[in-house]
Amino acid sequence: MKLWRSPLAWTFLASLVLLLGVGGWLLTDPATSRSDALKTGGLAGGAIVALYALWLNDRRRRVEERRQEIERRRHELEAQRAEQDRERVADERFAKAVELLGHTADQVRVGALHALAGLARSRPAYTQTVLDVLCSYLRRPFEHPRYDEGLDRRDRETMRGEQEQEQELTVRLTAQRLVKELLPAATDAEAPAYDLDLTGAVLEYLDLTDRKIGNLLLRYASLHSSTHFSRCLVAGKAYFTGAGTGKGRSVGYFRCRDAVFASVAWFSGTRFSEIADFRNTKFAGPTTFKDAEFGGDVEFTGAHATDSLDLRRTRFAGQTDLRFASLPESVSLYNTMVRGEKNVRLPSAWDFEELHDGALRVIAKVG
């Protein structure tokens, strides 16, 4: 009984019926030979078999497509499970590394920093989070005898602190180096721009040359020895407000040549104790050095300021070169002071005004 329910049996039955029916009907025509009648009946029956073969092939195709879809879904499910496992392992690695940053042994803290950097390299989605943790570590209070303002550069470089201070300094220098390594190159237009929040951080030999940065916060930070921002791209807002101010804080040799500040560049109240080099740097957004103090030589030769420039109450105590390559229409000069005994070079649109005490004030030429 089951055999007669199958499509194949019904196909052969229909084919046989057509063969006999068409052949028998044609044989009733005297003009049709027996061979032609059988041939035509066979073609009619064969058409039924061909239709069945097409249906069968289509059914096999649909079955294969369903099988492939099930296999695809299975692979997707396995991939999701594998991704969840990797995320779980990454979260565990991250949590363990952060926990080890509080370890008393400096080598353990260094290892934790490298573990975090390794996690960011293998899982780019963690990069900003890892940078936030590194910056948070660098914002921890830190003191060292060579940060004493009374020391000259030679004494500062040879000064050593207690063992615990030297160990912590090693960890912090490692954190600074890893921050640079995790930032993309300034020339990589497709790379994301990661933010750095180093507000109030105590930093030494900070080097971010040739790196791309999002928002850069260095408010009230202390930048000891030397700081390098040459050829870097700050795509977001840069705030150095009050950097180098306060007890034990300073901004040492500040190199920022050929850099680009694409947005706000805020140096209001920053105290530069040594050379500040801004040659060929581009300030594309609102820029202010209001109330800033330059204790050493400063150079702005070839620098471009395209939005606005605020130099109100800025003090220049050393050799000063303010020959910007281009200046915006909006330049604020009010009690902008330079030293008369120093070599001072100004743009053609500016001039000096001598005060009663012999000091020189920078003013814009009239007319």
Image (spheres, helix red, strand yellow):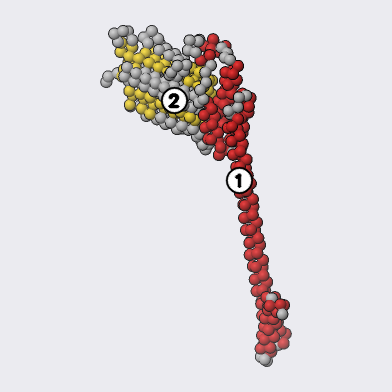
User: How far apart are the alpha carbons under marks 2 and 1?
Assistant: 39 Å
Q: Position of residue 271 (x, y in %)?
A: 42, 18
Reply above or below: 264 against 353.
Answer: below
Specify the label residue 84 is tagged with.
1
The N terminus lies in quadrant = bottom right
The amino acid beneath tag 1 is: Gln
**Point 30% across, 10% down: residue:** 355
Q: Is residue 134 visible?
A: yes
Q: Regarding mark 2 in the picture, which secondary structure is present there?
A: loop
Decide: few, some or many residues near mark 1? Use Cα within 10 Å; few <14, some 14-19, many ≥20: few
Q: Position of residue 348 (x, y in %)?
A: 35, 18
Outermost residue toward the left?
367
**Point 58% across, 15% down: residue:** 162
* Residue at image mark 2: 219
Q: Regarding mark 1 in the picture, which secondary structure is present there?
A: helix
Disc tally is 2
